[in-house]
């Protein structure tokens, strides 16, 4: 070993043992659920051309202003950025592969993997974290598709947490409503902006809607008096929102409406939502998403609407420690050469391989381990049976639960 000790980068985690397994199983549970809603898996690159995220996520979002991991340009004519979220890449793929031309609408996708944001690491806040999400696309996303995105998000979290969740919803309105609301906010905030935080000053310039999200105490006082979105929604907006809420009510999905929730990305229109663990609000949102009417066309595609959401899987792993255990799968056989002769060890390897070929998990200890040490290991890893390979190449099987030992033949075992 060298004398240099390396540490993982700030804001990253090693997922070890059961945690790593639970991560895979979470993605499994959510994949099955997403497929119940007709979604198909889509896997897109971990990095994309930088302008995709600037156009896609929006240059007024904190994510793009301060939080992207931009790759060092090694003389290529393009700049690349590690994905800070999935939607922009999925939409890029949706357009590039002309998936929008399919007559089988709505088109639905799900995905999972790492995303990267250069944030100040803290509780529940990493620089590389994992998400699972879905995106639904249609020419005009009807209330049903919108409601289903929320229901899917709710049901997935319920499946692994099995306790009360809180869904918070807001309706940002179509492009028209947003434009007049934006103007109203500009008119309101211009009288206060001088005394607000630096971030708000920049948001004021780029997208005043984002000021509603500000967490600074004194700014929140100002936000309290701001115009409310519901006063700017059109009749159609209100009807659509009401239809979505009716579906949720009929299914008894608990929700609250918050006119202040706008979420961090610029592209949302219509419904936005977040899901929290009702008993652990300190974890922050477990997931969130919303509808985007103009993102596909803004990225060069046709006029197609989307709605999507993502869970933060690291937060869900933390929240589900008790309710969602790793599936325990103990090895069926611990194959133990009793002699130190080469022939005995070779026979043991061969037997282990034949067992694996039959689909059994067969583990062998390091060959220099003593028999006593090996048995202790078999206990620790909860092997069901120890298969002793004797020096005369006969086999014996010890049932570790019943503590019974008997002679066996290879033919018996592989039957
Ligand atoms: P967003 O794309 O910002 O809406 O995030 C979706 C979900 O990802 C959030 O609800 C969180 O659960 C999770 N998330 C966002 N940022 C982080 C982070 N820095 N570290 C861990 N999880 C995060």
Image: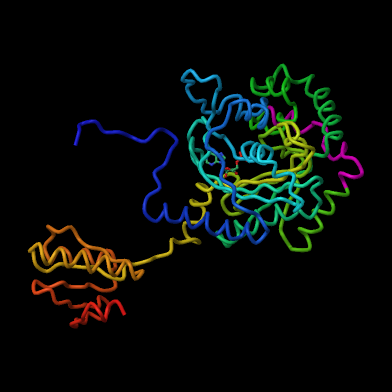
Query: Is residue 339 depicted above or below 269 in this figure?
Result: below
- Name the quarter showing ligand 1: top right
43 over 77 or under it: above or below: below
Task: Name the quarter where the C terminus is drawn.
Answer: bottom left
Answer above or below: position of 228 versus 390.
above
Q: Left or right? Give the position of 72 relative to 345.
A: right
**Does residue 78 belong to the magenta stretch?**
no
In this view, the residue farthest toward the right is: 235
Left or right for 314, reference 337: right
Q: Estimate the x, y position of residue 56 in percent, counting from the top left.
A: 67, 32
Residue 230: percent from left, percent from top = 85, 40
Direction from residue 372 to residue 246 in the image, left or right:
right
| Position in image of residue 61 (x %, y %) | 65, 29
Looking at this view, is 121 or 82 the one in front? 82
Please provide the residue range marked out in magenta.
Answer: 219-238
Foreground residue, 212 or 216? 212
Main secondary-structure element of the magenta-colored stretch: helix
Check if residue 221 falls in the magenta segment: yes
**Which image quadrant is residue 334 in?**
bottom left
Which quadrant is the N terminus positioned in? top left
Q: Estimate the x, y position of residue 382 in percent, counting from the top left.
A: 29, 68
Q: Is residue 258 above or below residue 204?
A: below
Count of numbered tags = 0
Q: Residue at x 82, y 36 (%)?
A: 228
Residue appearing at x 58%, y 44% in the figure: 284
């Amino acid at each position: 070993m060298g004398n240099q000790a390396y540490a993982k980068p700030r804001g990253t985690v090693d997922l070890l043992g059961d945690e790593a397994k639970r991560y895979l199983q979470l993605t499994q549970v959510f994949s099955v659920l997403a497929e119940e809603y007709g979604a198909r898996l889509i896997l897109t690159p971990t990095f994309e051309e930088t302008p995709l995220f600037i156009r896609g996520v929006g240059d007024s979002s904190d994510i793009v202003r301060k939080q992207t991991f931009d790759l060092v340009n090694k003389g290529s004519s393009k700049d690349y950025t590690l994905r800070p979220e999935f939607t922009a890449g999925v939409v890029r793929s949706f357009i590039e592969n002309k998936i929008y031309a399919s007559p089988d609408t709505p088109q639905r996708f799900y995905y999972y993997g790492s995303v990267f944001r250069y944030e100040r690491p803290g509780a529940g806040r990493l620089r590389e974290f994992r998400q699972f999400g879905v995106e639904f696309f249609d020419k005009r996303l009807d209330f049903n598709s919108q409601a289903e995105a929320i229901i899917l998000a709710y049901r997935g979290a319920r499946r692994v947490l099995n306790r009360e969740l809180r869904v918070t919803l807001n309706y940002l309105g179509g492009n028209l409503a947003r434009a007049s609301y934006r103007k109203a906010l500009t008119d309101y905030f211009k009288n206060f902006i001088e005394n607000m935080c630096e971030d708000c000053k920049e948001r004021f310039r780029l997208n005043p809607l984002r000021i509603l999200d500000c967490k600074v105490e004194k700014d929140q006082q100002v936000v309290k008096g701001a115009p409310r979105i519901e006063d700017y929604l059109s009749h159609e907006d209100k009807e659509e929102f009401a239809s979505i809420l009716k579906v949720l009510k009929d299914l008894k999905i608990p929700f609250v409406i918050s006119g202040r929730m706008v979420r961090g990305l610029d592209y949302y229109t219509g419904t936005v939502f977040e899901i929290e663990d009702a008993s652990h609000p300190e974890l922050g949102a477990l997931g969130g998403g919303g509808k985007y009417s103009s993102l596909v066309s803004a990225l060069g595609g046709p006029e197609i609407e989307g709605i999507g959401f993502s869970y933060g899987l690291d937060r869900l792993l933390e929240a589900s420690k008790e309710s969602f255990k790793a599936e325990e799968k103990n090895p069926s056989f611990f194959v133990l050469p009793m002699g130190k002769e080469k022939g005995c060890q070779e026979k043991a390897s061969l037997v282990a391989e034949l067992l694996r070929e039959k689909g059994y998990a067969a583990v062998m200890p390091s060959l220099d381990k003593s028999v006593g040490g090996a048995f202790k290991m078999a206990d620790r890893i909860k092997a069901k049976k120890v298969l002793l390979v004797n020096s005369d190449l006969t086999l014996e099987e010890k049932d570790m639960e019943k503590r019974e030992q008997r002679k066996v033949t290879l033919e018996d075992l592989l039957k």
